[in-house]
Amino acid sequence: MAPWTDIHCHGGGGHAFGGTVEGTLAAVAAHRAHGTARVVASLVSAPLAETARAAAVIREAMEADAGLLGIHLEGPFLAPSRKGAHDPAALAHPSREAVLDLLEACDGTLRQITMAPELPGAVEAVSLLIDMGVVVAVGHTECTAAEARAAFDAGATLITHGFNAMPAITGREPGPLGAALDDPRVAIEVIADGIHVARSNLATLFRAAPGRIVLVTDAMAAAASSPGRYDLGGLDVDVTADGRAVLAGTDTLAGSTLTMDRAVEVCVEAGVPREQAEAAASTTPERVLALG
């Protein structure tokens, strides 16, 4: 089993990242048991004080486990209509002040952030974050291809979970994913659990953007754990026996229960050459985040 790197993961083993130091370390260990040597801890949209509290927990856990690389903020700069499993009350526009407050709250641990580029101030925010050494991903968005290209030109280099929480590719409007496929500067995350994206689309994605696909789990606490009800950023999530995680009372997907070893196998089952699937779980994410 290769040593995988997961740059979008919310938890596992029954624990969410940022809850407690012990729980955060247990989540890292749960994914390590499935081959993930290095992981970026993803946090959902939350009030600034809660983000700062969770970041402090993750910072302490990083001192105990070098495999924990830092934080991915999946929000709060997201399109309300594409919020997925994010609290709408926690969403915000990416003003300069809001960006600087988040950087201060994370205190040097912020590796990556997901942003909807159509929001007011977003393109300027992309440039500011890039200058601060943060990788910016386009996601949870209603943006057009042109708006995505503006973000890419400002320095965004990643798409958050391609196909999910964004407009579809159509004949006259390629949308953010189509824009990314057309831009060799941009890598594309995908959740290869057989639930978020059809297997035939997985194979198509690898053919369309060779060397630019990044396998992520987007796993929540139930990964490498058991079915039941879980908390995700203050929202109730129900996990079924077949591993599907949805917001309680809805059919809205709320992360996954995926582990990286399974993601690689799903891609291979879909017809992706194993070498390419393994690169998407190792060398490609390492390149995206400029990991040594």
Image (cartoon, rainbow, N blue to C red):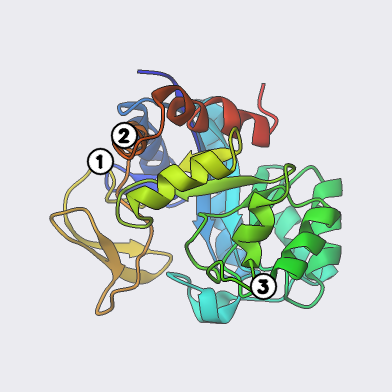
Residue depicted at 66% across the width and 27% down the height:
291
Q: Is residue 125 left or right of residue 73?
A: right
Is 291 situated above or below 184? above
Q: Nearer the viewer, residue 232 or 173?
A: 173
Is 187 situated above or below 292? below
Q: Which residue is mark 2?
A: 30
Task: Give the x, y percent position of residue 242.
Answer: 16, 54
SS for callout 3:
loop
What's the amino acid at mark 2? Ala
Instruction: Evaluate whether residue 34 shows in this view.
Output: yes
Does label 3 or label 1 sit earlier along the sequence? 3
Residue depicted at 65% across the width and 72% down the height:
173
Give the class, few, some or many, for how many residues have Cα within 10 Å of label 3's Cα (few <14, many ≥20).
many
* Label 1 to label 2: alpha-carbon separation: 6 Å
1 and 2 marks in contact (CB < 8 Å): yes
Q: Is residue 101 left or right of residue 172?
A: right
Q: Is residue 202 left or right of residue 132?
A: left
Image quadrant occupied by the N terminus = top left
Front of the two marks 2 and 3:
3
What's the amino acid at mark 3? Cys
SS for callout 2:
helix
Q: Which residue appears farthest toward the left when viewing the image?
A: 241
SS for callout 1:
loop
Picture quarter containing residue 123? bottom right
Residue depicted at 66% across the width and 53% down the height:
180
Q: Which residue is mark 1?
A: 224
Image quadrant occupied by the C terminus = top right
Q: Is residue 129 left or right of residue 162?
A: right
Q: Which residue is mark 3?
A: 143
